[in-house]
């Protein structure tokens, strides 16, 4: 294509010179505003025979969260990670993280709370701590 005949979409978008540019602008706006949609909503899932496709599950999705821990718990978490690394097989060591330990511990505590309610370890410890103050 010669330099004379090149289609300059940015020029058309900025100048608003054609109906085609307006349609492309609308399509671009729709693309930009699809942030609320998940990847699976916007793209078909590849077949399971595709070895390149990474399988993700609900448990793989993560959100960043900041919580304050006491210095004692923070140190205990480091110690726990080190001890777990001593126990597990060499190939699993890279998968042991403080985040993973906290996630698993919370999963166990919340399951206990869901099953036992006010008789759970979580409630007992919270009540014990609040009585000390």
Image: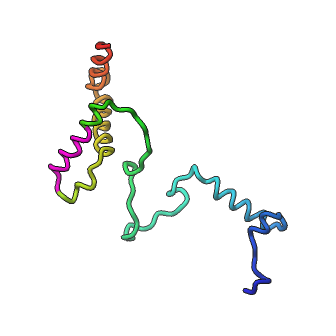
The verdict on residue 61 being magenta is: no
Name the foreground residue: 76 vs 19: 76
Q: Is residue 92 above or below residue 49?
A: above
Name the foreground residue: 92 vs 67: 67
Q: Which residue is pictured at 72% across the width and 86% down the height?
A: 1
Residue 121 drawn at (x, y percent): 26, 25
Which residue of the protein is positioned furthest toward the right in this rendering? 17
Quadrant of the image containing the C terminus? top left
Q: Which residue is pictured at 38% across the width and 32% down the height?
A: 68
Region of the chain picked out in magenta, as a range: 77-89
Name the foreground residue: 99 vs 52: 99
Residue 51 drawn at (x, y percent): 36, 70
The verdict on residue 81 being magenta is: yes
From the viewer's perspective, tell me whether residue 35 is left or right of residue 107. right
From the viewer's perspective, tell me whether residue 71 is left or right of residue 63. left
Residue 32 drawn at (x, y percent): 64, 56
């Amino acid at each position: 294509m010669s330099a004379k005949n090149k289609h300059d979409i940015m020029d058309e978008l900025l100048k608003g010179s054609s109906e085609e540019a307006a349609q492309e602008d609308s399509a671009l706006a729709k693309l930009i505003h699809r942030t609320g949609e998940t990847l699976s909503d916007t793209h078909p899932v590849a077949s399971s025979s595709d070895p390149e496709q990474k399988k993700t599950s609900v448990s793989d999705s993560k959100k960043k969260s900041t919580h304050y821990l006491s210095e004692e718990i923070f140190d205990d978490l480091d110690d726990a990670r080190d001890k777990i690394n001593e126990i597990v097989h060499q190939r699993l060591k890279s998968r042991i993280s403080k985040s993973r330990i906290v996630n698993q511990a919370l999963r166990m505590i919340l399951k206990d709370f869901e099953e036992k309610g006010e008789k759970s370890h979580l409630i007992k410890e919270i009540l014990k701590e609040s009585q000390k103050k």
